[in-house]
């Protein structure tokens, strides 16, 4: 069975390491741990990873965050992947740093990448793994915050949280959304 795992972020060196690029970090962890490399292809960078009986197509869209839906729609169609086998990994301001929440569907909650995916796919019914980045910014400072770097304390905790996110992705593919939510949403 094939799954599309789309880690959201912005391409380019100036965005690497920013809070908004946490989706890229998670799919990079999966690729690195699995010993697979990305190839630059249409609408992004793609790596293919086998986990037991599942083929994971890891996607880092090159469309920038606010047009992520174009890349996701293209790869869903190209690989003939059903919506139930799509998982979007995204940053979330409403969750404290490192908190991980898997959801089967939901609103964009103000996230422009998710808004574009919803508009492009015509539905909110796709799974997403939200990675908390916190909201420690002054009024009007949201853009600088999401495009800013993680604190030293957050970077210290990052490897463990990213590894846990990668475990959740694998469980989603092997055990399904409901079992995975029950196992991980309180960790």
Image (cartoon, rainbow, N blue to C red):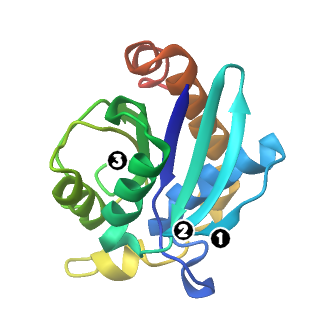
Res. 98 visible in picture? no
Please tell me whether mark 1 sits on a helix, a strand or a loop. Answer: strand
What is the crowding at mark 1: few (fewer than 14 residues within 10 Å), some, or many (at least 20)?
few
In the image, 57: left or right of 99?
right
Residue 61 percent location from the top left of the image: 49, 66
Of pointers 3 and 2, the one earlier in the residue sequence: 2
Q: Residue at x 54, y 78 (%)?
A: 11
* Residue 104 found in image quarter: top left
Q: Quadrant of the N terminus?
A: top right
Residue 155 visible, this angle = yes
Query: In the rendering, at what x and y percent does residue 121 appear?
Result: 22, 51
Image point 25% across, 67% down: which residue? 112
> Which residue is tagged 2?
44
Q: Nearer the viewer, residue 89 or 156?
A: 89
Which of discs 3 and 2 lies nearer the camera? The answer is: 2
Label 1 – label 2 distance at C-alpha: 6 Å
Q: Which residue is mark 1?
A: 40
Compared across the picture, whether 112 is left or right of 156 comes to left
């Amino acid at each position: 069975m094939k799954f599309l795992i789309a880690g959201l972020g912005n391409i380019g060196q100036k965005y690497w390491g920013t809070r908004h690029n946490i989706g890229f970090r998670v799919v990079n962890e999966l690729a690195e741990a699995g010993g697979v490399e990305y190839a630059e292809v249409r609408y992004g960078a793609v790596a293919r990873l086998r986990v037991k009986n599942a083929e994971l197509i890891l996607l880092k869209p090159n469309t920038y965050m606010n047009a992520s839906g174009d890349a996701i729609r293209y790869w869903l169609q190209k690989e003939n992947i059903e919506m139930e086998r799509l998982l979007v990994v995204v940053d979330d301001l409403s969750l404290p740093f490192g908190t991980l929440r898997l959801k089967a569907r939901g609103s964009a909650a103000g996230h422009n990448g998710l808004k574009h995916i919803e508009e492009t796919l015509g539905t909110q019914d796709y799974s997403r793994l939200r990675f908390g980045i916190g909201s420690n910014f002054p009024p009007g400072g949201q853009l600088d915050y999401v495009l800013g770097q993680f604190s030293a304390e957050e970077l210290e905790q990052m490897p463990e949280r990213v590894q846990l996110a990668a475990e959740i992705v694998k469980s989603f593919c092997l055990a399904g959304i409901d079992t995975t939510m029950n196992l991980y949403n309180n960790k």
